[in-house]
Structure formats: C-alpha cells, structure tokens
Image: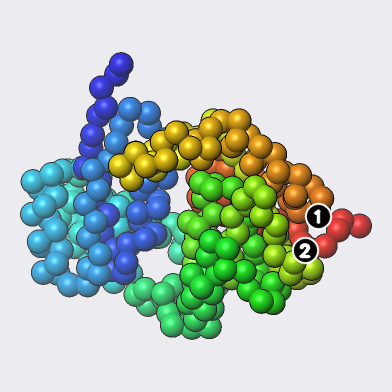
Amino acid sequence: MAQTRFFHLHLISDATGETLINVGRAAAAQYAGIRAVEHIHSLVRSAKQIDRIMVEIENAPGIVLYTLVDNKLAELLEARCSELAVPAVSVLEPVLKAFEIYLGARSTGRVGAQHALDASYFQRIEALNFSMMHDDGAVPANIDDADVMLLGVSRTSKTPTSIYLANRGIKTANLPIVRGIAIPPQLARAKRCLVVGLVASPDRIVQIRQHRVLSHNGEDRHSAYLDRQEVSQEVLECRRLCAKHGWPIIDVSRRSIEETAAAVLALLAERQLGPAA
C-alpha cells in the first residue's frame, strides 16, 4: 500500500477560522494519499501575532490560507510568506471582489461579521435548545413546534444530524424506532413538521453497533442488538412505517452527517416551494 504523505497547512483568521477550516479540508480531501497537518491560528488581529505565527511557519513550512480583513495585516503576512517562499492565499479576496463588482459597493471590512449577535444567531440558539430538549424520543407535545422530526433505528446518526440542523436554525427532534413499540400518536398528526426516516444497510448498522459495544467493555455482545436478522427487521419496520405515512426516507449508509443534513434541508426547501405546476 502507498504510504500517506503529510504537509503543513497554516490557517490564519481574524475570526474563529471556521471558514478556513472548511475550505482547507475540502481542498485537501481531493488528494488521495495526502493529509494535512493543520495549524489553526484564530483571532489574529495584530502584527505581533503575525510575528509569532511566522516563527511557526518557518519551523513547519507549508501552504498558508488566510482570511484577514485588515489590509495592512494581510500585506504583512503576504510579504513575510514571500520571504520564506511559502504560498499564501487569501480565501475571501476573490469572492469579495466579485461581490464589489456586481453590487457596486465596497465591503465593510468588519471582522467576524458572520458571527454577529443578530436574529439568525438567536434563532440558532433557540433551535439548539429545542433539539437538546427533544433528543432520543422526547417528542414535543405539539409535534408542529418542531421543523423536522428524524426517525430511525439505533445508530443511524439521528442525534448528530439533529444538532447539525439546529446549528442551521432548524428545530429538530428525533425518535428511535424500536420493534414492538408504537410511535407517539401526535407524530401521525404532524402537519407543519417534516418527518424524515433515516435508514442504513443492516451490515453498516451492525458494524457501528459492534464498535459501540466494544467501547462499553463488550456488554450485550451476543444480544439481538447485534444480530443481523434482527437489525434487518428493524430497518424493514422503519421503512414500512414511513411508507404507511408517506414520510420521505434517507439512506445514511454512505453519507456523512453534513450530507444527511443537506438532504433534509433539500426536502424542507421542496416542501416550502410546494408541488411543481
């Protein structure tokens, strides 16, 4: 097998660095057999901080990605990187230039503008609180208080998907489907809430459950929890339940949490647009 190659990736931001982390990882993922050693430098807002970062870059040279709205700091970083012959790329600059040309307006240069404590921020906090209160079967008394209800057997990533959606401002609850236990009656009466079933292949579910059992000192190693036929029946019952009520199903066997959440958001968008004419 080919040996994995590593390179240093310096991510320099005057805010939290989330944008850079996502861009850097998306780019690095395109190169098979190569992995980035990330050096994350967040809240960089002074020349002294740049000086300290340059010492680290000199000791571990690699690619530099940055988001610095202060032009003087950006120019200082670029000049220092040029001296070391390491590439430095402004991730936002080409995007901001396109916006300026199209909108005919200059950017404000406001640090961390996307993290402002505005209405959308408080909407995300409210959604996170809601999702935490309605995790793993704690169904809202009024189901339509939720934007989304995720159904699925154990180990179909209901909770992490709920939290991810909540961070996008979507009030999400989730309910485990257990053989022999009926769903809450209010779920069948849902009108505004989007109910989505999450399923996976039995083999994938058993694999995940085995890892979980091993992490808990091997308890229930031989129970129905790990029996493939039992798991197949669980998944089948979930599919039948969703088919009965006309609820959409997402197969998460080969999806990341982000991809599953994106599929749910697409279903929400379709619902808001209504049926095609």
Left-right relation of 259 to 143: left
Q: Position of residue 110 (x, y in %)?
A: 37, 77
Q: How far is disc 1 from disc 2 in space, using C-alphas?
A: 7 Å
Q: Is residue 5 visible?
A: yes
Left-right relation of 177 to 163: right
Direction right: furthest residue: 277
Q: Secondary structure at mark 1?
A: helix
| Residue for point 24% across, 56% down | 40
Seen in the picture, residue 125 relative to 164 is either above or below; the reply is: below
Marks 1 & 2, CB-CB < 8 Å contact: yes
Q: Position of residue 56 (x, y in %)?
A: 11, 52
Label 1 CA crowd tier, 10 Å (few <14, some 14–19, many 20+) = few
Q: Position of residue 69 (x, y in %)?
A: 33, 69
Q: Amino acid at mark 2?
A: Ala
Left-right relation of 3 to 186: left
The residue under label 1 is: 245
The residue under label 2 is: 188
Q: Position of residue 15 (x, y in %)?
A: 31, 69
